[in-house]
Image (cartoon, rainbow, N blue to C red):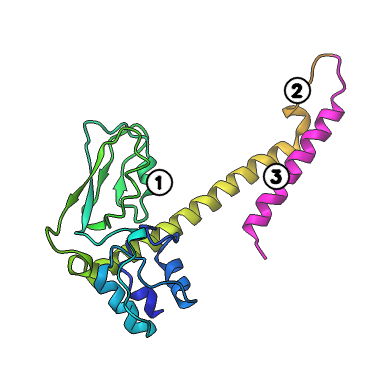
Amino acid sequence: MALHAALPQTQCTRCGYPDCAAYARAMAQGEAINQCPPGGHEGVARLARITGRPALPLSTEHGSEGPRHVAIIDEDWCIGCTLCIKACPTDAIVGSNKRMHTVIEPWCTGCELCIPVCPVDCIVLENVTEARSGWAAWSHKEARTALQRYEMRKVRLAHEAQAHDERQLSKAEAKLADLPAYTKVPEGAAAQPEIDRKRAILEAALAKAKARQNPR
């Protein structure tokens, strides 16, 4: 889609949509073309040429045009909470739980999504393009890299979700196969009602998990 290709692919959500692709679809259906601050005024002009609509001023409600930034983590203050890793749309932050995190700068789009989730405010933005802003601070090559990183992240998350569901299915099926061994009841109480209750819970959970794996 030409509208999608004309966006800088920062995936910053400042346009009001969950990603650049969603905003492109919305524009194709008539949404305003001036809601992308990273693209700036030149970005609005490009979208206007594609849509044939007037090039309106950039919407101040969605932000202002500015230079490109990259996130920098103060490693002395980082507590390794992994929240910024989960928030980064391009997997530009690496680290592990309770270990120091760091940013791979060429992959960072300056989306700012890591800033609000950091509980110790150890992330700052560094201007890497000085006075250049909008598309003057962002190339098509960088946009392609950002999109590739974003798409790779979506694939990774899908694989991880599937692996998680498969592990949960395996555990639930193992318990369902031998419920008496996994059922504890007060001494002297009848075990069967509690076994039946757990069976109903596990069967419902299995049905939901299988439905997620095989959506119609």
Q: Are marks 3 and 2 in contact (CB under 8 Å)?
A: no
Amino acid under label 1? Answer: Lys
Mark before the other along the chain sequence, 3 or 2? 2
Q: Position of residue 101 (x, y in %)?
A: 28, 40
Mark before the other along the chain sequence, 2 or 1? 1
Q: Which secondary structure lies at badge 2?
A: loop
Q: CA distance from mark 3 to mark 2?
A: 20 Å
Residue 210 shown in magenta: yes
Viewer-nearest of labels 2 and 1? 1
Residue pointed to by mark 2 = 184
Residue pointed to by mark 1 = 86
Q: CA distance from mark 2 to mark 1?
A: 37 Å
Q: Which secondary structure lies at badge 1?
A: helix
Residue pointed to by mark 3 = 205
Q: Residue furthest bottom?
A: 52
Residue drawn at x 36%, y 66% as measured from the top left:
35
- As drawn, the label of residue 34 is none
